[in-house]
Each structure stands twice: as C-alpha cells, then as structure tokens.
Image: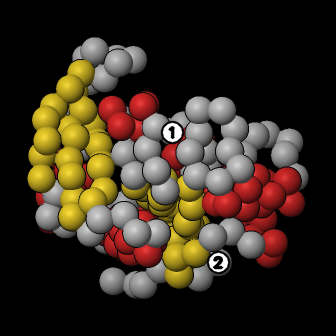
Amino acid sequence: MPTLDIRQLGPADEAAFLKGFEDWGVEASAWHSLTWKAGMSHADHLHILANEFQGDVAPGRVPHTMLYGFLDAVIVGRCSVRHTLNAGLSEIGGHIGYGVAPPFRRQGFATQLFRAGREHLKSLGVDRAFMTCDSANIGSSTLIENAGGVLQDEVLDAVDDDVTILRFWVDL
C-alpha cells in the first residue's frame, strides 16, 4: 500500500486542491473542504485554515487542523482534527472526521488519515477522541473499532431521522 504524505495545505497546493473537487464527483464538496467557497482565492483559503488552526474561528466552529493526504501530487482525502468539541460536535461529528475521494477508496488511505489525525489530536493533549459515523458506513465503523473505538450508543440523526449515527470513544 502506498504511503500518503499527510500535511496541511501550502501555497503550492492550489492545483491539487482544486482538482480534488473533481475526484469527489457528485458527492458533497464538504467532504473535500469545510471552509473553501467557490471563487475564493487559495491565499484566502490558507488564511482561514491558519486562523482556525490558531483558534480564530467563525461562530459555531471550533479550532481545528485540516490535514490532506497526498499521493504524489494528488489529494486522495482529508482529515479534520477538531481541537475541542462544541455542543453540536459532542452529539454528531466528534474530534476526528476524515474522507477519501471515491476513486481512492478501499486502499487503506482512510486508516492512514485517521492515524495522522489521532496523532495530531494526541499532540494537543487530548486523551480520548469522540468519533461518529453513519451506521451504514461499514468501512468507517470497522476502522474506528479496529483502532480501539468503543461504541457509546446509537442515535438518530437530527437532520434525517432515517439515519442512525454510531458514537464511539477512542483512547489515544
């Protein structure tokens, strides 16, 4: 399995970042970025990410680090590490959220992204990570369980009550 270069975006990553949206296809762009908006310059995007890393966040958001997994010069996925939790993330979302673009799934990249996120969160002094996933996402629930995740409970999604969310705690 190829090893990803997992890191924050830099000034030279604009083309790879924009190409990443194509790799997500019809899926929601939030899986690729939580902050970028159409028409935003790469420099402005990097500025927002730097501010959020340092704790200067918009209302409703928490300090976080966005890590991207590069295979050569291609972004295959990302991992958002939330330094703290707010009320919403304490219900659904958690400390670590990751996603792999459809063309790169089932190749072990999610595990690499999760491990990088776990190590980063641990370096911030967090001992346990709260994580959630859709109960239908067998790959994600298996990854979390294989990492030592202990199921806390199952809840209905507040937005879509046809979706059950699994909530886990993972010791770091």
Q: Residues within 10 Å of mark 1 (few under 14, many from 20)?
A: few
Q: Which quadrant holds residue 25?
A: top right
The residue that appears at 25% across and 17% down in the rendered structure is 162
Location of residue 118 (image quadrant): bottom left
Q: How is the image coloured?
A: secondary structure
Q: Residue at x 44, y 75 (%)?
A: 123
Q: Position of residue 158 (x, y in %)?
A: 35, 18
Between marks 1 and 2, how big is the CA–CA gap? 22 Å
Horizontal and vertical percent position of residue 48: 76, 52
* Left or right side of 121 for 17: right
Viewer can see residue 160: yes
Q: Nearer the viewer, residue 4 or 85?
A: 85
| 34 versus 46 height, above or below | above
Residue drawn at x 29%, y 43% as measured from the top left? 132
Q: Amino acid at mark 2?
A: Ala
- The percent position of residue 56, horizontal first and vertical second, equals 71, 50
**Element on which disc 1 rests:** loop
Return the mark for residue 1.
none
Residue at (75% x, 40% y) in the render: 37
Query: Position of 10 compared to 144: left or right?
Result: right
Q: Which residue type carries mark 1? A: Glu
Q: Which residue is mark 1?
A: 27
In the picture, the quarter occupied by the C terminus is bottom left
Can I make out residue 116 in this image? no
Q: Residues within 10 Å of mark 2 (few under 14, many from 20)?
A: few
Q: Is residue 105 above or below residue 152?
A: below
Q: Are marks 1 and 2 in contact (CB under 8 Å)?
A: no
* The N terminus sits in image quarter: bottom left
Q: Which mark is residue 73?
A: 2
Q: Is residue 19 left or right of residue 144?
A: right
